[in-house]
Each structure stands twice: as C-alpha cells, then as structure tokens.
Image (cartoon, grey):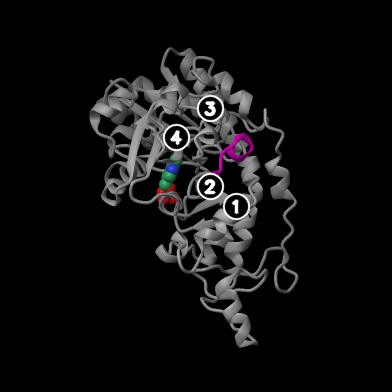
C-alpha cells in the first residue's frame, strides 16, 4: 500500500486571487509585458519564477493547475495540455526519435493504440505490443533501443491493473522510462510512488468530472517538464497543445472535489457490479474477487478511494449490448455516450467505438468482444435504485 496522501495535498493548496479572491485570478492574456528588455532575453533562456512571456510557453492559470496536478501525482513538476492525447503524444515525441522502440501494453485506449500502431512507424519508431500483466513478456520485448515502457494503471476498457512496481524494475534495469496513463484511477493509484517516471492523464474524465471540456496533463521530474517547454527542442513548446486559461480555471475548481467524487463513483461501482455479478452476469470490475488483479490493486493503492468508477458488463452479443444501452438511456440510467468520469452514468460498447481502432483479431486476443458494455457509473445517491433500473432494463433485453 502506498503511503502517499494526494487528497491532503490538494486540500492544502492555498491560492489567492489578485484581489484576495478565494480562487486564483484568470490571466486573460496571450502575451506578457516586461519592464526591462534584458529580462525578456533572460526568460527565453530559462524559467524565472513568477515571470511569464507568452501563453503557449506558460501562463499563470496553467501554472496553478499544473502545480496542483504535480501534488496529486507526487511528482516534482507537471504541465497541462489541451487534451489527454496531446499529453501522450508530446511525452512520446519528447522521449523517442527515429530508430527508438517502445514496449507497450496491448490493452490501452484506442487513440493511444492508433498513435502507436499507425503514426509512430511513419517516424521510424517501432512499437511492440505485449501482455503487460506478464512481466516476463515485457522483459523479453525490451531491446537496447527501447526508450519507453508504456501502460495504463487501470486499462481502458478491460480494467487490467498494471503491476507498476515490477514494470518499473524492468524499466530501471534497462535504462528506459516507465510512462503510465493514470486516467482511470486518479487518487486511487499514485504511479510515481510505485516507480513510474512520467504520469499522464486525460483530465477530460474523472479529474474534471463534468464532461464540459477536453484537457490533459504530463507529470514528471522538473527536468523533463522543463524540457517539454524548451524554446528550441520542447515538444509542447513546438507542437503547441496549450490549454486555454478559462478551461484551466474550471478544472482547478473541480479538482477540489475529486476525492469526494472518486469515493462515490467507487462505492456505486462496487455496489452495482457485486449485485449484477451475483445475478449471474459476467462483470469485469477490479473490486470483485473474480478479477485477476483484485489483490494486486489493494497492494498498490492509496486506501480509501475504492476500485474506481468503471465496470464492464458482458452481454455476449453486439445486438444485446446495443439493446441494453438504448434501454438504459430510455430509462434514464445515464447517457449512451463515449468518455467517462462524469457525474451522470455514461455507457458505450468499446468494441464498436472507443476501441474500434484496434483490429478485430487483436480485440479478440485481449477478450475485447462485441458484447461488452463499459459503464462509467455516475455520482448516483442511491446505487440500489440504479441497480433496480438496470435490472429492469436487463429483463427487457431479448
Ligand atoms: C480518454 C482517454 C485518453 C485521451 O484523452 P483525451 O482527453 O480524449 O484526448 C487517453 N487515455 C485514456 C485512458 C482515456 O480514457
């Protein structure tokens, strides 16, 4: 078990606004003035605390939000981006060049999969996909050219839980960087405390929690985060995935309630997945004893936030999965929509949507069949009531 207390770190953030406001002031400027010309020159060369040059580089609100996320993940530094994909692509492009290799888990978010499979080979970067729950397979895939070992702490959509301590041992042994996408388990798992070098998030999901914007973050050492905004060679500086200050301000406020939300998401997911599983349905949820990494997750988590807000229901066929989702929307269990981590329940069939980038034979190999329904449970006050409605819908599926 980790002894990191990220929720306390977030609680202790003390940011004052310009006029003593309880929220920091939003900087409504793309560019910043200098009293002395020499200072501008200096800032081009190195970061100066409290000094800003141009908003693509850094701006005050993005600094506040980035600092909050560094506290959340227990890293020295962090840098917010305009999307989760921007965070992932910028990390990889900063670390890898032509001739380098990446060893990645084969069960990852569809967009990341497509970037690895289709985009990186165009740049001469080789990606090897492995079953990352099998550490021996990971070790065998690493070569002298491997720069990155990549995984999700809890994978999308199969909810495999990564053995980060073992993966970090392999990455340290071979001198590569362990990059972990922690989108599914903020607060629950602190990858940097388990040996990850870089942690990324899609803030779009649980961290913002309102499904009203798209954003991401890269958390890591000060040296790595600074390298991303280097004016000559930084991926974030040169590719320009800057987050808007207004959105940044909104996300910063929502982080303040993340611990309350995660507990409720987890409590609801546990309650409903246990009931459905007792009813004889095949349910994938790390909180169930039947889940292969049920024990591992409890060994590595920060206690008190549960097993997360997602579970997967196996409806056996695509037709039944689709019928159930339409019934659940019509009976107001939630919305038939991609994405996750919203206050209201969201569900989709990953085979035909968020994981459709993965070819069918590979989906089969990882057990990602067409009958799966991924459910991101909302902040429902009464999970028994939600369970009863889902049960009613299930009874109507023919
Ligand atoms: C959604 C998601 C992403 C991509 O994030 P965006 O904010 O949509 O760009 C990356 N990884 C995981 C695990 C996700 O669920």
Q: In this view, does 103 lie above or below 387?
A: below
* CA distance separating discs 2 and 1: 7 Å
Question: Which comes sooner in the sequence, label 1 or label 3?
Answer: 3
Q: In which quarter of the image is residue 301?
A: top right
Element assignment for label 3: loop
Would residue 195 be counted in the magenta stretch? yes
Q: Which residue, as the protein is rendered here, is positioned at the far bottom? A: 36
* CA distance separating discs 1 and 3: 29 Å
Q: Quadrant of the C terminus?
A: top left
- On the question of residue 337 being in view, the answer is no
Q: In which quarter of the image is ligand 1?
A: top left
Would residue 297 be counted in the magenta stretch? no
- How many residues crowd mark 1 within 10 Å: few (<14), some (14–19), many (20+)? some
Q: Identify the residue at horizontal 51%, vertical 50% (top origin).
A: 203
Badge 2 is on which residue? 209
Badge 3 is on which residue? 163
**Labels 2 & 1 near each other (Cβ < 8 A):** yes
Query: Is the CB atom of the residue marked by disc 4 within 8 angstroms of ligand 1's nearest atom?
Result: no
Badge 1 is on which residue? 254
Image-based side of 74 in relation to 356, left or right: right
- On the question of residue 383 being in view, the answer is yes
Q: Identify the residue at horizontal 31%, vertical 27% (top origin).
A: 321
**Labels 1 & 4 near each other (Cβ < 8 A):** no
Q: Which of marks 2 and 3 is in front?
A: 3
Element assignment for label 2: loop
**Labels 1 & 3 near each other (Cβ < 8 A):** no
Residue range of the region highlighted in magenta in the rendering? 191-199
* CA distance separating discs 4 and 3: 33 Å
Element assignment for label 4: loop
- How many residues crowd mark 3 within 10 Å: few (<14), some (14–19), many (20+)? many
Question: Which comes sooner in the sequence, label 2 or label 4?
Answer: 2
């Amino acid at each position: 078990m980790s002894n990191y207390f990220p929720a306390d770190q977030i609680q202790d953030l003390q940011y004052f606004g310009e006029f003593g406001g309880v929220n920091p002031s939003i900087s409504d400027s793309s560019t910043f003035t200098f009293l002395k010309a020499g200072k501008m020159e200096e800032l081009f060369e190195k970061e100066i605390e409290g000094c800003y040059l141009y908003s693509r580089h850094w701006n005050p609100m993005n600094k506040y939000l980035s600092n909050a996320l560094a506290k959340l993940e227990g890293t020295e530094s962090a840098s917010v981006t305009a999307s989760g994909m921007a965070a992932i692509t910028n990390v990889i492009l900063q670390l890898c060049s032509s001739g380098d290799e990446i060893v990645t888990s084969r069960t990852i978010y569809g967009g990341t999969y497509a970037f690895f499979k289709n985009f990186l080979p165009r740049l001469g970067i080789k990606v090897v996909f492995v079953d990352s729950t099998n550490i021996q397979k990971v070790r065998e895939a690493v070569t002298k050219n491997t720069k990155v070992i990549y995984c999700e702490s809890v994978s999308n959509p199969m909810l495999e839980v990564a053995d980060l301590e073992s993966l970090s041992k392999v990455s340290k042994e071979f001198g590569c960087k362990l990059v972990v996408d922690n989108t599914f388990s903020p607060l629950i798992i602190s990858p940097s405390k388990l040996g990850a070098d870089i942690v990324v998030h899609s803030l779009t999901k649980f961290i913002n929690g309102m499904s009203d914007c798209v954003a991401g973050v890269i958390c890591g050492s000060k040296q790595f985060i600074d390298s991303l905004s280097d004016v000559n060679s930084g991926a974030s500086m040169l590719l320009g995935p800057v987050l808007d200050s207004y959105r940044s301000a909104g996300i910063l406020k929502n982080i303040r309630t993340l611990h309350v939300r995660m507990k409720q998401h987890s409590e609801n997911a546990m309650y409903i997945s246990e009931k459905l599983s007792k009813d004889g349905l095949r349910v994938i949820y790390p909180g169930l004893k039947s889940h292969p990494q049920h024990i591992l997750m409890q060994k590595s988590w920060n206690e008190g936030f549960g097993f997360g807000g997602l579970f997967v229901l196996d409806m056996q066929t695509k037709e039944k999965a689709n019928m159930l989702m339409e019934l659940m929307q019509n009976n107001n269990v939630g919305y038939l929509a991609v994405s996750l981590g919203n206050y209201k329940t969201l569900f989709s069939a990953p085979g035909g949507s968020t994981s459709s980038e993965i070819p069918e034979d590979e989906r089969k190999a990882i057990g990602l069949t067409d009958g799966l329904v991924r459910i991101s449970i909302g902040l429902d006050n009464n999970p028994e009531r939600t369970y009863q409605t889902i049960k009613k819908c299930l009874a109507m599926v023919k």
